[in-house]
Amino acid sequence: MKVAIIGCGLIGQKRASALGEHSLAVAVDISEKKAARIADICSCGVTCSDWREAVKRPDVDLVVVATTNDLLAPISLAAIREGKHVLVEKPAARSSSEILPLLEAAVKAGVKVKVGFNHRYHPAFRKARQIVDSDVLGPLMFIRGRYGQGGRIGYDREWRAIPEIAGGGELLDQGVHLIDLSRWFLGEFVQVDGFTHTYFWDMPLEDNGFMLLKTASQQVAWLHVSCTEWKNMFSFEIYGKNGKLQVEGLGGSYGVERLCFYRMLPEMGPPETTIWEYPFPDDSWKLEFDAFIESIQNNGSVEGNLQDALAALEIVESIYGGN
């Protein structure tokens, strides 16, 4: 595959480093310096500042869209209409209404579209998925998830604090990851309750979001996302009738990634405990990209697709509308 990366910030750099045997055809950013940095990572000398030019290039098979939220859907739509496969970063759009044209266009063009839900590809979550699928956890009851970071000086003046660019605050930013993971394990949610508020940052968008999501069989996901965490943290607990799984940390400032399996014994009491730790560098970006390439080559289903993004955005919008 020959790839165009549009948006050469931190996430674009992560995507560039995960291309593996595939080659970068062009790096695109309004900042020539950022585009050149990614071109250097991939030993590619081709850069440009106009994404419209990039999606039309005949030597591009796949477009990675890693821009601000306001440009995710327009660039993806243009690339799809040019017959390119697309990997667009979460949340894929600012609203569900921006997702719908992408779904229609992808079917019409016969291309694959993946949304950047890379958390599904962290090794702790791949192992958790295997354990849940083996049924040793028993029927799932509920999920409790927390995801928080502390921002930085000037955070409330960055693009994520501007409504027309970001589309939403912390609930849309980190919240869609927790929603996607919860849907991945529990399925569709039929009842959505939640609350958002701005407690600390001087911005018109929320810095905390709280969710209570319920399936038709009364399974619940109780989720909290925050950019007032001060010490970055990630915790995701999956409770079954026979035990519990807990994923903690995502590496880096979030701490060592760890999966704990607490298996309930027949006599109950203290559980049998197994712990896996994953101290090596985060390879979720490469695993996600490789899985997407495989779905393209084998014409298979895409894990973490536009339908998943649509479902997450509809939940976010329901909570925004209920505030």
Image (spheres, rainbow, N blue to C red):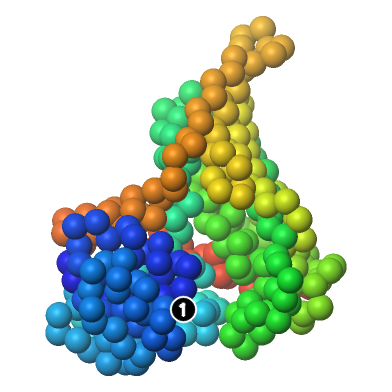
Q: Nearer the viewer, residue 236 or 2?
A: 2
Residue 39 figure quarter: bottom left
Residue 194 is situated, as x and y percent measured from the top left of the image, at 74, 62
Q: Is residue 175 left or right of residue 288?
A: right
Residue found 67% across the figure and 48% down from its top: 233
Quadrant that contains the N terminus: bottom left
Residue 129 figure quarter: top left
Residue 53 is situated, as x and y percent measured from the top left of the image, at 27, 92
Q: Amino acid at mark 1?
A: Thr
Q: Is residue 220 left or right of residue 207?
A: left
Quadrant that contains the C terminus: bottom right
Residue found 36% across the figure and 90% down from its top: 49
Residue 184 is situated, as x and y percent measured from the top left of the image, at 48, 49
Residue found 66% across the figure and 66% down from its top: 171
Q: Nearer the viewer, residue 174 or 6?
A: 6
Q: Is residue 7 left or right of residue 255?
A: left
Question: Can I make out residue 104 in this image?
Answer: no
Direction right: furthest residue: 199
Residue 133 figure quarter: top left
Q: Is residue 198 left or right of residue 55?
A: right
Q: Is residue 269 above or below residue 242?
A: above
Label 1: how many Cα within 10 Å (few below 14, some 14–19, many 20+) = many
Return the residue at label 1: 67
Residue 162 is situated, as x and y percent measured from the top left of the image, at 66, 84
Q: Nearer the viewer, residue 294 or 231?
A: 231
Residue found 52% across the figure and 79% down from its top: 69
Q: Is residue 180 above or below residue 185?
A: below
